[in-house]
Image (tube, grey):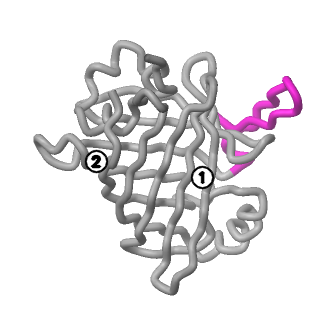
Amino acid sequence: MKKSIMQNALGNQWHELPEALKNHYGSNEQGENDAEGKLDIEYPWFMQFPYSVMRLIGALVNRRGKGLKTTVSKIMKDDEQHWHRVISYPDGNQIIFDSVFVADKDGFIEYINAYLGLKMVAFVENKKLHYESRGYVLKLGKVKIPIPEWLALGHASIVESEYKQGDEQTFVMDFRIKHFLFGEVFCYKGVFTTLYRGI
């Protein structure tokens, strides 16, 4: 069975993950893995206009909220993992956030469109999964041009852990972006349950 992007990125540390995260990041025979949960989205007022502009190119989310129903679908297509997120608001509106994960030298890159991506590395510490950004990428054909974090939104980090002892389906995630000048410029966090188990 083909390994997922995260399995390859973690290497031997994959076996240190709690079952809830293995189920979320593993791939079944169809390469599918879905989750649903509640998401809180926060960012400072001065980032409203930048995020509204960035939504035009598919980046992040430009609306705050708490306890928002969210579904996350992942599927492997060849060597790419495609993520499809649907965030639903109480007024009936939805925001769709798609991205593509591809393997990189020491981790992976998450592309929000055909040109812009975020380099990430992953590791396990105290049974928690950590992502850390390593700069941004502008892809022009086969050429990848690095963009320093300080020239973009800043440093991104994600921490994910099992929701409670013995729960093999539910996990907690916390994603934050911090800029060295402006502080924390984006945060979304929530509790999710995997609907279709991985390997």
Give the extent of the magenta segment: 135-152
Q: Residue at x 65, y 74 (%)?
A: 48
Task: Indicate whether residue 197 is drawn in magenta.
Answer: no
Pick out the residue farthest to the right: 141
Q: As displayed, is residue 143 above or below residue 58?
A: above
Camera-side residue of 131 and 167? 167
Residue located beneath label 1 in the image:
179
Residue located beneath label 2 in the image:
171
**Residue 159 image-quadrant placement:** top left
**In the image, residue 184 lies at what x, y percent?**
52, 59
At label 2, counting other C-alpha atoms closer than 10 Å, the crowd grade (few under 14, some 14-19, many 20 or more) is: many
Identify the mark nearer the N-term, 2 or 1. Answer: 2
Camera-side residue of 140 and 28? 28
Camera-side residue of 133 and 73? 73
* Mark 2 or 1: the one toward you: 2
Which secondary structure, mark 2? strand
Pick out the residue farthest to the left: 166
